[in-house]
Image (cartoon, rainbow, N blue to C red):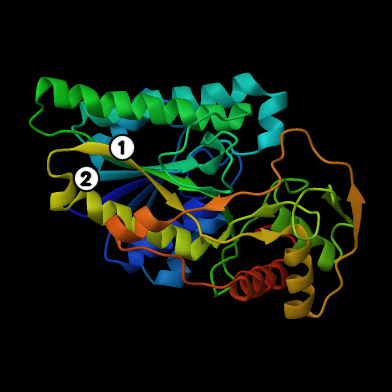
């Protein structure tokens, strides 16, 4: 058995595809499962071009227990990186049942299939949206959890399920206990430096950076900045932005930790993956204009319900226990986003 074969769920997506590149570059074998509902198989061909290595792809849904069982039977999988999930906050408010079915039920089916195959190492793609409002704007892992939208609640519910799963092994003294890392993302942006893979949202982007780049290249007419009257330095919302390549390096570090003495007795632990500093919406726009030389047409719009004025990560625990920290600057994130956008004006199409 190859002790370094990783199943990547949602591996054709934005973050999943970058994780595949990092895993292959680190010497792992990669098996991808993706239902292609918000991604394209072309992404995986480009992953292979970037790395010069091949991966195994299965077009299937993580809610399909039979398909998962067949994959675990055919492939010598030793750990799972779980990215498969719907991720738009606004859409989750409009389609909550779809989000609960895909994100929560899908993870239940995956965990059952893993358990039956005795594959009990899992790196889970969680989110900073699991946190509630706080008096502090820098969020640590021990802050109260209290998501304010269905998307965040799906991530919170999955975290709770995985914590219960790990605790059960402790109670029964399992010989091969669950080893789980819950990685709470802040705001991933950027693209691979090759410009071959990047963020390619369906329809109108939900996230700030692809919207900015599509306005700059002329694909969209104007960016709406939601609120300029927040109690921040320029009145616009402040968030923690992290380069997607830094983010996926954090996943490989987490995977290594699960395989180390630190998790010898099992366990389930959460880590923030963020840069540890905040940038406002206007910071993003101005830096984008400076780096690219393009003007971003924007207008001020009313605040959106549920948006916080400011929050960013305290990433100290990930540095202390995983040996990971974000290294790329905002300039790098924007330059790589623009490189991807210019080389792929229509995305993977």
Circles 1 and 2, Cβ within 8 Å, touching? The answer is no
Q: Which residue is mark 1?
A: 71
- At horizontal 58% and vertical 66% (from top left) the residue drawn is 191
Q: Secondary structure at mark 1?
A: helix
Pick whichever, 12 or 147, lies toward us: 147
36 above or below 320? above
- Residue 128 coordinates in the image, percent (x, y): 53, 43
The numbered mark at residue 128 is none
Cα distance in 3D space between marks 1 and 2: 12 Å
Q: Secondary structure at mark 2?
A: loop
Q: Which-is-in-front pick, marks 1 and 2?
A: 2
- Residue 178 coordinates in the image, percent (x, y): 21, 34
- Residue 142 coordinates in the image, percent (x, y): 40, 39
Q: Which residue is mark 2?
A: 78
Pick whichever, 349 or 106, lies toward us: 106
Pick whichever, 267 or 189, lies toward us: 267
Quadrant in which residue 91 is drawn: top right
Outermost residue, front side: 135
Mark before the other along the chain sequence, 1 or 2 = 1
- At horizontal 59% and vertical 75% (from top left) the residue drawn is 332
- Residue 102 coordinates in the image, percent (x, y): 52, 27
Quadrant for the C terminus, please: bottom right
Q: Is residue 266 left or right of residue 58?
A: left
Q: Is residue 349 left or right of residue 275?
A: right
Number of other residues with Cα within 10 Å of mark 1, as a class: few under 14, some 14 to 19, many 20 or more = many
Number of other residues with Cα within 10 Å of mark 2, as a class: few under 14, some 14 to 19, many 20 or more = many
- At horizontal 10% and vertical 27% (from top left) the residue drawn is 174
Pick whichever, 53 or 276, lies toward us: 276
Number of callouts:
2
Note whether residue 20 is visible. no
Quadrant in which residue 66 is drawn: top left
124 above or below 170? below
């Amino acid at each position: 058995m190859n002790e370094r074969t990783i199943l990547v769920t949602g591996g054709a997506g934005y973050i999943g595809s970058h994780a595949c590149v990092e895993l292959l570059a680190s010497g792992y074998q990669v098996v991808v499962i993706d239902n292609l509902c918000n991604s394209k198989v072309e992404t995986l061909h480009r992953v292979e071009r970037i790395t010069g290595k091949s991966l195994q792809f299965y077009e299937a849904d993580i809610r399909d227990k039979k398909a998962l069982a067949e994959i675990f039977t055919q492939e010598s999988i030793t750990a799972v990186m779980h990215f498969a999930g719907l991720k738009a906050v606004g859409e989750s408010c409009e389609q909550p049942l779809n989000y609960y079915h895909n994100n929560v039920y899908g993870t239940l089916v995956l965990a059952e299939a893993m358990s039956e195959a005795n594959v009990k190492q899992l790196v889970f793609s969680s989110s900073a949206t699991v946190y509630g409002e706080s008096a502090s704007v820098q969020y640590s892992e021990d802050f109260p959890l209290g998501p304010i939208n269905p998307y965040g609640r799906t991530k919170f519910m999955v975290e709770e399920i995985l914590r219960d799963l790990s605790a059960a092994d402790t109670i029964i003294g399992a010989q091969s206990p669950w080893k789980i890392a819950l990685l709470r993302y802040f705001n991933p942006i950027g693209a691979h430096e090759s410009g071959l893979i990047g963020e390619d949202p369906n329809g109108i982007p939900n996230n700030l950076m692809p919207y900015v780049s599509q306005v700059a290249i002329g694909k969209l007419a104007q960016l709406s900045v939601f609120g300029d009257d927040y109690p921040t330095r320029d009145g616009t919302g402040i968030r923690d932005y992290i380069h997607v390549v830094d983010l996926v390096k954090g996943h490989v570090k987490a995977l290594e930790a699960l395989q180390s003495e630190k998790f010898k007795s099992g366990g389930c632990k959460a880590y923030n993956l963020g840069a540890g500093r905040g940038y406002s919406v206007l910071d993003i726009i101005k830096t984008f204009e400076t780096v690219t030389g393009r003007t971003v047409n924007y207008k001020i719009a009313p605040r959106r319900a549920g948006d916080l004025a400011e929050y960013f990560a305290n990433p100290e625990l990930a540095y202390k226990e995983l040996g990971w920290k974000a290294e790329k600057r905002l300039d790098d994130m924007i330059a790589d986003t623009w490189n991807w956008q210019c080389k792929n004006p229509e995305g993977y199409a």
